[in-house]
Structures are given as structure tokens and as C-alpha cells.
Amino acid sequence: MEQERVKCLIIGSGPAGYTAAIYAARADMKPVIYQGMQPGGQLMLTTDVDNFPGYANGIGGPQMMTDLQKQAERFGTDIRNGWVTKVDFSATPHKVEVNDGEKEILADSVIISTGASAKWLGLESEARLRDNGGGVSACAVCDGFFYKGKDVAIVGAGDTAAEEATYLAKLCNKVYMIVRRDEFRASKAMQHRVNNTENIEVLFNTETVEILGDEGVTGAKLINNKTKEEFTIDVSGFFVAIGHKPNTDVFKGWLDMDATGYINHAIPGTSKTNVEGVFVSGDAADKVYRQAITAAGTGCMAALDAERYLAEKGLH
């Protein structure tokens, strides 16, 4: 197997990975990025980004990622297609296998920016309207503003769904909350918040059959899974809040993680993991904020932490 030694390997290419690359390249760490299965990360599924500072008129998610990639390349980042399929963090330099054994990278420092993937319902209509920017979203905080004064639906029964439903209720005319079972999974406090919000209507024992609309969402066909009665609701936006899965499976057994797979910080307030020389940024470690701006901020932190680590080890 071909081997290559690099000073700083960045795994993943969302806002966290590209920001880490910009800082690392400017510090002459000669970073190499492997873009992963979804170059650009979750923002490639986002049509309009209105809340990232500096874009006065907003920007499309894919365009923003292209801009970040160009900025990273301007400082000499080596950006490569491909994904990491195996790691060995038992010794330094760390061994990282790419593309099922096509190459082995020996990395003095590793920055993990593999992000997370939203869980979806798996409907054809959902994928079509999500991918053409037609009103299906997995982030109410990102996209709720576009539905000001309109009726929307949100699927989910946990704390995140309850929190996002109450967030949407402040902006939207009406929020239908679609819950598959006959009860919430959310904490009692979040349930009270939903129940005390007048313009949220909770539909228990309800599942989505189809999201309606050609160019944009016009409604949803639902079914009561107890009575088998089908009915439709008129909505302009459809939010899915059934959870995220961090893209961290390849690091299992090496890094400390929570039960879902989010990587734990060895020292709170830093990007350090339990393995020396391995750092984490973005949504691979963040189940709370999950925003492009927070991911970018932690990408900066990871690059600075990696630079200090390399300097202490006499490798930079």
C-alpha cells in the first residue's frame, strides 16, 4: 500500500473542515483535506443561507462551500476527493487509510470534521422537494424565517422537535407537530412548552404518507396509524426533526463518544479528543448548536490546537 506522510490531515469538507484548512494553511502546516462522501457537507442541501455573517444578501449553501474551498486552496490546502475507511490511532504518526486501502496517510496531526447527517423519513417526495429547495428542511433554526406568517409541519417527538416547533410557532401562523406514537419522547418541560403554545397543533399516532407539491411544498398527506384514516394538511414548509447521526463510525474504538456517536472533548472548551494529536470540530462533536458558524468556529479552534501540539512535539 502506498504511504504518504503529512503534517496535518483534515477529514471532511464542511464549514469546519475548510475553516480548519484556512488556518492550518496560513500557519504553514501544509494541510491535506479528504472531502468525504458528501463534499461540502450538509450545506450542499441548503438553498439559502441567510444567517452566516458577512453575506448581507444571503448566499446559497453550495456557493458558500465553493467560496470556502477556494479560500482554503488560495493558501495552499491540498484538497482531495476520497474518504477515510480505516484508522489506527495506537501510535504516532497516526495511520489513516483512504478509499479502502488505496493509500495510507501517516499524519502528525488529524482534524476530524466529518459532520453529521440528518435522519430523513425516506419518502420520494421528501427527497425531491428537499433537493430542489422546495420547502423540506431538517433545520428549523436555519430555515424557519422563510416561512414567516405561513403554516408549516414538523415531524418528531423528542426534545429537538419540541424546541424547533416552539421556535417555528414564534414565526409561523400555525405549526402542525406530527408524532408517530401516542406520546412525546421529549422531556416534561419541553412537552409543557409545546402544550402551552396556542398555535401548535399536535397530531399523535400520525405518520406522513407523502409531501405534496411540485415546485414547492403545498401540503402533506398523513395517516392516523390507529384508525388508518388518511387526511391532508395545507402547509408551505415541512421540517424533519427525527434526529441526526454523526459520521463517526470509522473512529469507533479509538475515540471517546457518547451513545449516539458524537465525539467527546477530552478537555471542555478545546478541540482535543482522548487521543493525543487528534482533534475534532463541527457537527461530529456538536449535537446542540449545529450551525455553519459554530462549525467554522470550532474548525478554527482545531487548527490552532493542532498547531500548538505540533510545535510542542517539535514537528512544526
Image (tube, grey):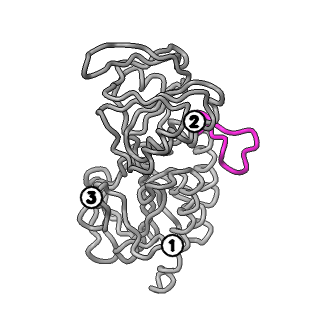
Q: Quadrant of the N terminus?
A: bottom left
Q: Secondary structure at mark 1?
A: loop
Q: Position of residue 169 (x, y in %)?
A: 57, 35
- Residue range highlighted in magenta: 47-61
Q: Secondary structure at mark 3?
A: strand
The label on residue 269 is: 1
- Looking at marks 1 and 2 on the same chain, the residue that comes earlier in the sequence is marked by 2
* Magenta stretch holds residue 51: yes
Q: Residues within 10 Å of mark 3 (few under 14, many from 20)?
A: some
Q: Secondary structure at mark 2?
A: helix
Q: Nearer the viewer, residue 107 or 248?
A: 248
Distance between mark 3 and mark 2 Cα atoms:
44 Å
Q: Position of residue 305 (x, y in %)?
A: 51, 75
- Looking at marks 3 and 2 on the same chain, the residue that comes earlier in the sequence is marked by 3
Q: Nearer the viewer, residue 197 or 3?
A: 197
Q: Residues within 10 Å of mark 1 (few under 14, many from 20)?
A: few
Image vertical order of residue 284 relative to residue 204, above or below: below
Q: Which residue is mark 2?
A: 169
Q: Which residue is mark 3?
A: 86
Q: Quadrant of residue 75?
A: bottom right
Q: Quadrant of residue 252?
A: bottom left
- Looking at marks 3 and 1 on the same chain, the residue that comes earlier in the sequence is marked by 3
Distance between mark 1 and mark 2 Cα atoms:
33 Å
Q: Nearer the viewer, residue 28 or 243?
A: 243
Looking at the rendered structure, the kind of residue marked 1 is Gly
1 or 2: mark nearer the eye: 2
Residue at the image point whose x is 48% and y is 40% from the top: 194
Image vertical order of residue 172 relative to residue 21, above or below: above
Q: Residues within 10 Å of mark 2 (few under 14, many from 20)?
A: many
